[in-house]
Image: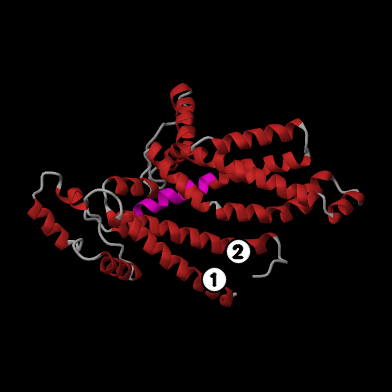
Amino acid sequence: MLRYVVRKLAQMLPVAFFVTVIVFALTNLLPGDPTVTILGEQASAEQRAAVRVEYGLDQPAPLRYLTWIGRVAQGDFGRSLRTREHVSEMLSARVPVTLQLSFLSILIAVAIGVPAGILAARFRGTVIDVVASFVAMSSVAVPYFWMGILLIMLFSLKLGWLPPSGHVRFFDDPAQNLRLMILPSLTIGTAFAALVMRQTRASMLQVLSLDYIRTARAKGLNEIVVVLKHALRNALIPVVTVIGLQIGALLGGAVVTETVFALPGLGRMLVDGIFQRDFPVIQGAILFIVIAVFTVNLLTDFIYRVFDPRVKV
């Protein structure tokens, strides 16, 4: 087990290195002058030149990259050019919001997608299968921002059941926190549920055609037992793979969703950093997302063994 973890981490290091290079390069290719973020548009050329020297912006890009990656290796993501706040402190304050949003979105996706996929596979070719497939395709086709606007119009403006935006920390007011997180979670979760449903259906169809399922039915077992106990567990392995691989897309959806619903999460932090040309904030947020994706992919490999002990690490 330990050897496997070390090997996986060794494989990730070259990828992580190239990711940091790409993140740094793309960040510095953004149009605009970061000194405007610090001093404002009325600053003189001499003031801007002094700020460039102070923040090391006058140095060559390779040297700035080496300085940045050296600090990151020590856990120092730098300071925001606009607020002078440590990026690590900004991440610690905003990451829990995004993690909660992601967790609730996955719960919604699994709660909707897995049962729908099972029903669609069990009643293949019927109205249930057609309706489930149509709803899944429609959910995938709707952009996150549009889905969020539709949910706000329906549940907030029309019905008045839920607040349209805002955020309260969970430990300050758990009930209000969950009420504010329902619509953002539904925005991401419904689109994610469509992918889970399609993968569950395809995997269940494959498993239900295997010999051991026919044997279980021939022994007179109840159909519910056959589907849920014998077929579902083996069918969930590809579903777990899809969920793990879609974490990056889920975090990408959080960028848009947090902006629509005014959530102070990692995605909103990234968007604000891009608009304000706040390079340390952009680099820290993207690097954290990359690390999170790597970690989830590693955990996905271990979850396989929970559903199928025959899978060896």
Q: Which mark is residue 136?
A: none
Q: Is residue 4 magenta?
A: no
Q: Give the percent coordinates (x, y) of residue 186.
A: 52, 38
Q: Indicate the position of residue 65 as horizontal and vertical percent values.
A: 30, 66
* Left or right: 267 in relation to 239: left
- The N terminus, quarter of image: bottom right
Residue stretch in magenta: 90-105
Q: How many marks?
A: 2
The nearer-to-camera label among 1 and 2 is 1
Q: Is residue 223 left or right of residue 278?
A: right
- Queried whether the magenta region covers residue 92, the answer comes back as yes
Relative to 105, residue 23 above or below = below
Tell me whether circle 1 and circle 2 mark residues in contact (CB < 8 Å): yes
Quarter of the image with the C terminus in it: bottom right
Callout 1: few (<14), some (14-19), or many (20+) C-alpha neighbours within 10 Å? few
Q: Nearer the viewer, residue 115 or 139?
A: 139
Name the spot of residue 97 as percent of width and height, x first. Answer: 41, 48
Identify residue type, mark 1.
Answer: Lys
Which residue is tagged 2?
301
Q: Residue at x 31, y 48 (%)?
A: 274
Residue at image x 65%, y 52%?
Answer: 239
Q: Which residue is mark 1?
A: 8
Q: What amino acid is found at the position of numbered circle 2 in the picture?
A: Asp
Q: Secondary structure at mark 1?
A: helix
Which of marks 2 and 1 precedes in the sequence? 1
Up the image or down, 193 lies above or below 134; here it is below
